[in-house]
Amino acid sequence: MLSLEDVRLGIGDFTLTLDAEVPEGQRVAVLGTSGSGKSTLLSLLAGFVVPDRGHVRWQGKDITGLPPAERPMSILFQDGNLFPHLTVAQNVGLALRTDLRLDDKESRRVAATLDRVGLGGMGGRRPADLSGGQQGRAALARLLLQDRPVALLDEPFAALDPALRNDMAGLLEALCREHGLTLFLATHDLRDAERLCDRVWLLQEGCVVLDRPVAGLREAVPEALSDWM
């Protein structure tokens, strides 16, 4: 269980307020217009910002003050955050060792994870040598190799064309299912929410104004989702 207990975070004139529980393995789509607080929410969960009040708990343990490296979360940004001067294998290997001094066992783990996301044999390439979809797969490989139970994704498909978007969404769905990941997916696209998630939060001005299952969402509350339909 991930718990957000009476959480409040103020940044300038913006305030994010949350009080919710998310069972382990649940996938939550976070919808909202620009400025609604989607990225701020993921940053708070990841530990990049600390709330002014309230607590974040994972499996009953208070992780509110823990730095990002000590949290059970991994995060994937829209651009994938691949380093252009490193090879694909090195970019992925950062999940295991930031100094990239991988032993044979760790190198085999990197190769196996690249195979899993369809990038077998491409570990020696640079990110610039990959297509947009392949870069996204490399970023997913690094997230997977971090082996953390909560995945935070911030608009991961926004720059992809429809075919690549479907391909990446299918891969992410399979990875979530295989590894039992708890997922927070910030997105502008209701189709991503419907395909990948079983719960939706609609954020407006830092507040969750809608929290319900994805099933039957369009029919139940069409007026609240007019921006995404």
Image: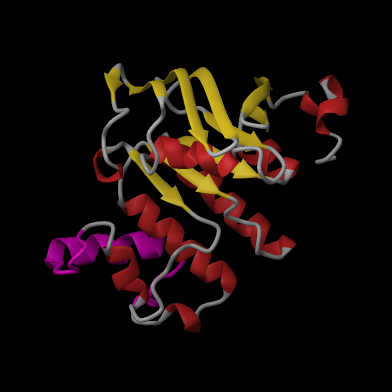
Residue in the picture at 65% in, 64% down: 159
- Provide residue 18's location: percent of width, then percent of height: 53, 22
Q: Can you see residue 22?
A: no
208 on left or right of 70 = right
Rendered image quadrant of residue 111: bottom left
Rendered image quadrant of residue 124: bottom left
The residue lying toward the viewer, choosing from 36 and 216, is 36
- Provide residue 93's location: percent of width, then percent of height: 27, 64
Q: How many marks on residues?
A: 0
Q: Is 192 drawn above or below residue 28 in the view shown?
A: below
What is the residue that sits farthest to the front in this orientation?
12
The residue lying toward the viewer, choosing from 223 and 10, is 10
Q: Is 26 drawn above or below residue 114 in the view shown?
A: above
Quarter of the picture holding the C terminus: top right
Q: Is residue 84 magenta?
A: no
Residue in the picture at 36% in, 58% down: 142
Q: Can you see residue 38?
A: yes
Residue in the picture at 66% in, 43% down: 35
Quarter of the picture holding the N terminus: top left
Q: Is residue 100 magenta?
A: yes
Magenta extent: 97-123
The residue lying toward the viewer, choosing from 191 and 155, is 155
- Provide residue 169's location: percent of width, then percent of height: 60, 51
- Provide residue 96's location: percent of width, then percent of height: 22, 57
